[in-house]
Image (spheres, helix red, strand yellow):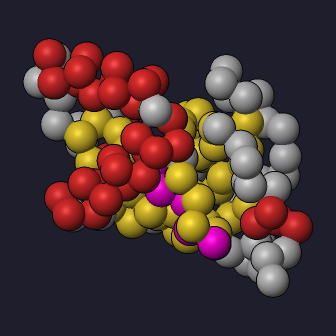
Amino acid sequence: MQNQAIQQFNGQQFVNIETYRKSGLGVRTPVWFYQDGNTLFFTTEASSGKVKRIRANAAVKAAPCKVNGEVIGEWVPARAELLDQAGYQQVSRLFRKKYGLQKVFFDVIGKLRKREMTALAVYLSPEQEAQ
């Protein structure tokens, strides 16, 4: 049974991921996501700031949000992990199911701009104290 902290992500379109700079300052970014139990998956540019921050510090927080990043739920502590290319392909397929033509459109734009993409898994840990 999922607890309330996990259930708040069910049916949502966006999640706000807070990553941390070396100084400890949090940086919040709204992203599309796919949920599988206690794990959230999202994609981003491989060279993005959030990927660099996660490589340095895997501790993150996540909260459901609106497209503009406005949080509409509670922050949940989590740990993020970069996935390999096979993981990216799997997450991309799941996104096509969830987001449909919007995902196809963003894929086309990304290919035209020759952006290298990666996927990340965010393992929610509601029992842990938030940073």
Q: Is residue 35 found left or right of 49 in the rendered image?
A: right
What residue span does the magenta drawing correspond to?
A: 37-42
Number of numbered discs overlaid on the protein picture: 0
Q: Residue at x 59, y 33 (%)?
A: 30
Quick check: 118 left or right of 53? left
Q: Residue at x 60, y 46 (%)?
A: 18
- Say if residue 122 shows up in the picture: yes
- In-image side of 115 versus 97 (left or right): left
Residue 57 lies in the magenta stretch: no
Residue at 63% x, 38% y: name it: 14
Majority SS type along the magenta span: strand
Residue 84: give x, y in percent of width and height: 21, 64
Residue at the bottom extreme, as displayed: 1
Task: Give the percent coordinates (x, y) of residue 53.
Answer: 39, 49
Figure quadrant of residue 130: bottom right
* Quadrant in which the N terminus appears: bottom right
Placement of 102 over or under 120, stated as above or below: above
Residue beneath the point at 73% across and 36% down: 65
Quadrant location of the C terminus? bottom right
Residue 73 in the image: state x and y as whole percent.
Answer: 84, 46
Mark yes or no: residue 56 visible. no
**Percent position (x, y) of residue 4?**
88, 67
